[in-house]
């Protein structure tokens, strides 16, 4: 493994310092939840090792999301990032090949790079609505392809893969003897009807998710792998045991209590999301320098400065950061041109979101040449 630090982490707001940011539009999650809202008492909690696959009650409640799953299909991990790492390092050798979408959550690309396997990037393009081109996907598959890695709802664009396309891609993967990995961290925040878990499609499909984004609980580091393949689950468990043995008993206890009240919590999440997205959509409707593909899920969007806009992009980011104290995710975080920017609209308070968007408009005007 040859690791390198990712720009999205080097330049993250927690590394920069939250005290230096007035309007934080980089976050890709809901507002951070306080533990007190779960109304739990951990004084009597035994601080022991937990079941290596995860607390049985927690796995049972995760599995209850779909009739196709049993608790044995669930492995609890230290966040979705660890789940993605486990899947990639368990399945891929340097002699293997992966097809992975770009732009993407950085870990989905950087971990295969660290492994040193062959990689083909499935480019998601603005002009096609960041939709997956299945013909292009087929063309990228080689005899060495072991894994196809996708995300839906997508980070950073908010695009959602239609169910019929997911079925088609699962069939493509199966026909080539490859596994399909779908990062479904934003699944509960799709703007449409609930999206079925990809892993329900068959033993060759792997789903990954967590509580960090939708429920504002990144601090408890709880995610999971869903897979209906006992041999793969045994492999993933072996990887987990070698990396961190088991999860924190405190984290699992808090996660279990959150999921026990998921239904009512999700109502509040959706209400907040609807309001925040409405603010961004109204703001975008008045922009003449920016354009976007309207997201279909999640709490992020990925607008870009129009090609014919005479904007000094480097000056824009400097003005936005230094003069307005406003922080967005620049395109290079996702290996894209810096004319793109990821805007997170779920995390900030309403006033902070509105001011941050206004500051983007002002910084664009100041950075416009002539």
Image: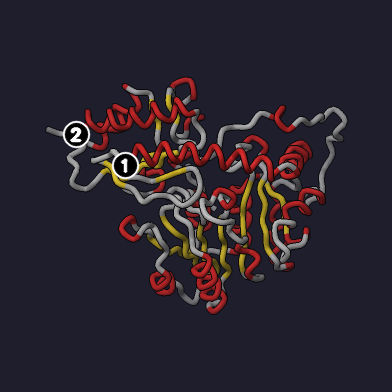
Residue at the left extreme of this rendering: 370
Q: Position of residue 266 (x, y in %)?
A: 63, 43
Q: Is residue 356 above or below residue 311?
A: above
Q: Which mark is residue 127?
A: none
At horizontal 18% and vertical 46% (from top left) the residue drawn is 308
Q: Position of residue 250 (x, y in %)?
A: 77, 36
Dividing the picture into quarters, in which one does residue 46 lie? top right
Q: Position of residue 202 (x, y in %)?
A: 65, 71
Q: Nearer the viewer, residue 67 or 241?
A: 67
Label 1 close to label 2 by CB (< 8 Å): no
At horizontal 29% and vertical 38% (from top left) the residue drawn is 286
Residue ID for mark 2 = 368
Colour scheme of the picture: secondary structure
Q: Position of residue 237 (x, y in %)?
A: 73, 57
Is 367 left, or right, of 250 in this rendering? left
Quarter holding the C terminus is: top left
Q: Which mark is residue 285?
A: 1
């Amino acid at each position: 493994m040859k690791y390198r630090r990712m720009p999205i982490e080097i330049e993250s707001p927690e590394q920069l310092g939250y005290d230096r940011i007035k309007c934080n539009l980089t976050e890709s999650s809901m507002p951070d939840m306080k533990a007190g809202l779960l109304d739990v008492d951990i004084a009597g909690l035994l601080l022991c090792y937990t079941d290596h696959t995860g607390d049985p009650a927690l796995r049972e409640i995760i599995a209850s999301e779909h009739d196709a799953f049993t608790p044995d299909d669930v492995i609890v991990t230290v966040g979705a990032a660890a789940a993605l790492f486990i899947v990639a390092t368990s399945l891929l050798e340097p002699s293997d090949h992966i097809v992975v979408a770009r732009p993407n959550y950085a870990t989905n690309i950087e971990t295969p790079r660290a492994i040193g396997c062959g990689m083909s990037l499935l480019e998601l393009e603005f002009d096609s609505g960041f939709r997956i081109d299945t013909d292009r996907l087929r063309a990228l598959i080689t005899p060495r392809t072991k894994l196809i890695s996708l995300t839906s709802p997508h980070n950073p664009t908010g695009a959602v893969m239609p169910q019929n396309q997911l079925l088609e891609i699962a069939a493509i993967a199966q026909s080539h003897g490859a596994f399909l990995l779908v990062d479904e961290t934003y699944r509960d925040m799709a703007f449409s009807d609930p999206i079925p878990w990809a892993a329900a499609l068959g033993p060759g499909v792997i789903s990954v998710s967590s509580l960090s984004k939708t429920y504002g609980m990144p601090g408890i580091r709880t995610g999971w792998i869903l897979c209906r393949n006992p041999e793969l689950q045994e492999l993933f468990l072996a990887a987990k045991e070698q990396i961190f043995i088991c999860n924190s008993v405190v984290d699992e206890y808090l996660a279990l209590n959150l999921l026990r009240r998921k239904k009512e919590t999700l109502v509040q999440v959706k209400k907040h999301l609807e309001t925040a997205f409405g603010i961004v959509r109204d703001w975008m409707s008045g922009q003449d320098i920016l354009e976007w593909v309207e997201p279909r899920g999640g709490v992020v969007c990925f607008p870009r400065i129009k090609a014919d806009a005479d904007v000094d992009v480097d000056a824009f980011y400097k003005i936005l950061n230094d003069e307005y104290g406003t922080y967005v995710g620049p395109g290079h975080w996702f290996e894209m041109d810096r004319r793109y920017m990821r805007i997170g609209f779920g995390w900030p308070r309403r006033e902070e979101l509105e001011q941050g968007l206004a500051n983007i408009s002002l910084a664009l005007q100041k950075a416009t040449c002539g």
